[in-house]
């Protein structure tokens, strides 16, 4: 049985030259992995040693590969608090927060800092610390524009509050990628065929208004089944089911007709 060489074996058996060193540094950077010397000493010591041998020190080798080592070392200026604040700010702006995208962009030094063992240990943990759901960030990133619009329509049909304030609370990753793809949340709403002015000026419900709405539907001869009401008045249905009102459509109807 033929034994396949491991990555570690390939690293150790590599024949190093100046060109090979530079090529490996570029590959390492393009893969989204950290390039500061402490990390390299732990994860790719052979490359670090070869770089020092051919270029005098690691920083010069990185610069020779066309990268700014000053930028790479700037991770030292980041604190945990600053990282969390910046992640949240970038998220509100609709920035692609996937690891690869961040590592290849201007905020790579922040990512270098975030993944250090004495900080968050990984980019995923940094996102969690900032109150974000990593799985949503990566899930929505793979979506096409039409998938995003379909999700907006689905939420609307279910009676969800699509105002930007509520979406930032309840579906922050969706609104972030929608802003990035369509320029703004309102543009995404309009592209989905909805009227953002109506959504922004959404009705503020009370128990009395919900009861009145249910009675009005009954007077019009409209079936009060959950399926029908979701279709004709999704906002009423969603409001009635909220915990602070009735908690379920069944209880709302019982209160309205009692």
Image (tube, rainbow, N blue to C red):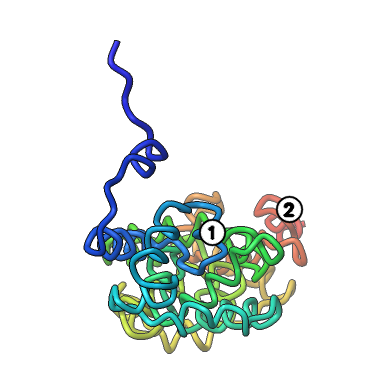
Is residue 164 something that shows in the picture?
no
Q: Which residue is mark 2?
A: 251
Query: What residue lies at 38% left-to-right and 85% top-to-bottom?
Result: 184
Query: What residue lies at 38% left-to-right and 74% top-to-bottom?
Result: 178
Camera-side mark, 2 or 1: 1
The one nearer the camera, 98 or 4, is: 4
The first of marks 2 and 1 along the sequence is: 1
The one nearer the camera, 139 or 127, is: 127
Density class for disc 2 (Cα within 10 Å; few <14, some 14-19, many ≥20) is few
The one nearer the camera, 16 or 103, is: 16
| Image spot of residue 1 (x, y percent) | 29, 10
Q: Specify the quadrant of the image occupied by residue 104.
A: bottom left
| Image spot of residue 155 (x, y percent) | 46, 63
Distance (Cα) linking label 2 and label 1: 36 Å
User: How many discs appear?
Assistant: 2
Is residue 215 something that shows in the picture?
yes
The one nearer the camera, 70 or 179, is: 70
Dot 1 falls on a residue whose secondary structure is helix
| Image spot of residue 215 (x, y percent) | 63, 66
Query: What residue lies at 25% left-to-right and 58% top-to-bottom?
Result: 17
Res. 53 mark: none
Q: Which residue is mark 1?
A: 134
Density class for disc 1 (Cα within 10 Å; few <14, some 14-19, many ≥20) is some
């Amino acid at each position: 049985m033929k034994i396949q060489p491991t990555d570690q074996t390939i690293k150790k058996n590599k024949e190093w030259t100046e060109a090979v060193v530079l090529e490996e540094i570029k590959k390492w950077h393009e893969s989204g992995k950290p390039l500061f010397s402490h990390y390299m000493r732990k994860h790719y010591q052979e490359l670090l040693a070869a770089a020092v041998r051919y270029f005098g020190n690691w920083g010069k080798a990185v610069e020779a590969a066309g990268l700014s080592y000053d930028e790479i070392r700037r991770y030292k200026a980041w604190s945990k608090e600053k990282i969390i604040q910046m992640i949240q700010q970038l998220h509100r702006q609709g920035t692609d927060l996937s690891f690869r995208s961040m590592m290849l962009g201007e905020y790579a030094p922040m990512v270098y800092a975030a993944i250090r063992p004495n900080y968050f240990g990984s980019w995923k943990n940094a996102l969690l610390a900032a109150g974000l759901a990593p799985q949503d960030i990566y899930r929505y990133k793979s979506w096409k524009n039409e998938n995003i619009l379909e999700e907006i329509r689905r939420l609307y049909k279910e009676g969800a509050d699509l105002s930007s304030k509520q979406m930032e609370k309840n579906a922050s990753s969706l609104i972030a990628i929608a802003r990035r793809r369509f320029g703004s949340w309102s543009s995404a709403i309009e592209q989905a065929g909805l009227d953002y002015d109506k959504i922004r000026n959404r009705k503020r419900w009370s128990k009395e208004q919900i009861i009145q709405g249910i009675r009005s539907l009954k007077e019009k001869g409209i079936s009060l089944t959950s399926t029908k009401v979701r279709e004709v008045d999704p906002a009423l249905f969603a409001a009635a089911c909220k915990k602070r009102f009735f908690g379920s459509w069944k209880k709302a109807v019982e209160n309205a007709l009692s």
